Image (cartoon, rainbow, N blue to C red):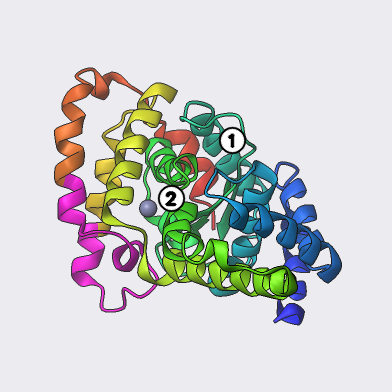
Amino acid sequence: MRLILSVALITLSISATSESAGLFDSLQKLTDPASKERQILSGSSQVLSSSKEIDYPTERTIGESLALEGLQRFGNPVKNEALQRYVNLVGNAVATNSKRATIPYQFAVLDSPVQNAFAVPGGVIFVSRALVSILEDEAELAAVLAHEVGHVSAKHALKSTQRAQFFEGVGTITAASVRGDKGKKFASAIGDMQAVLFDKGLDKDMEFEADLAAMETTYRTGYDPSAMIRVLEKLQKLEASSTNKKGSWFSTHPPLAERIARLQAQLQKYPDHSSLASVHDRFAKTAKVK
Ligand SMILES: [Zn+2]
């Protein structure tokens, strides 16, 4: 697994934009077993010692482990520097207007044929080439990225895992078994989060929360918040004609009709929404290149 990851990382650093270079450096560090173990164990001991919120470096370390897994499953970043820079500009614009604006966010378009986007704890966010290819303007891209920023802001993946794994048996670790036991617990928590993020999906309520956050965040950034609805309607059309939904926004998210209905109700909060920006031309120029 490590070998495959290294190959992915080399390809990755070639296509890295200046904005995402820091991300790739830190992902590289994770391939050093010594540093990975040190960081992970210091993080896990903190998580396991109490139910208090974990600190940001620990969250980021967990997220980067999951990001590596995501690259393996969905593919490397698309080798198009202008596109990657553009997605980072739009992503950071919405992140700045999100509920959690103080952490660093990094975005990458992955070379995947499945319409998907996902966020790992700490602020690394991936969107697939296939999902970008069905979008028609910058507001729609902003909505997708803002949905993922919403998951990061609300720490949805971490909450899923803390509930599933960490709250059980926290007090039963003895001094003799501390190291090995904590290491194993951490590994199983990472595995649990992988299953949630890539296979099972988050709780329905978390998805609705991220949808509503996306609408609010795009609105505050100056985009027409109805873009989120337009994206979901596109996916709905696609879903009707698609046979393979595995790993896509269809399989890991609640039914699209329900998401759209909730967003349409929320749209009443923004009576001036159609006067806000959609930015079609810049998107077409930068994101529609092959
Ligand atoms: Zn989601």
Neighbours of disc 1 within 10 Å: few (<14), some (14-19), many (20+): some
Locate residue 196, reporting x and y percent: 42, 66
- Viewer-side label of 1, 2: 2
Dot 1 or dot 2: first in sequence order is 1
Q: Examine the rendered structure and indicate whether residue 211 appears above or below residue 44.
A: above
Q: Quadrant of residue 40?
A: bottom right
| Viewer-side residue, 254 vs 59 | 59
Q: Main secondary structure of the magenta part?
A: helix
Residue occupied by mark 2: 156
Report the label total. Answer: 2
Residue span colored magenta? 236-260
- The amino acid beneath tag 1 is Leu
Locate residue 236, reporting x and y percent: 21, 58
- The amino acid beneath tag 2 is His
Drawn side of residue 231 relative to residue 88, left or right: left
Cβ of mark 2 under 8 Å from ligand 1: the answer is yes
Drawn side of residue 250 relative to residue 290, left or right: left
Locate residue 179, reporting x and y percent: 74, 70
Locate residue 81, reporting x and y percent: 68, 49
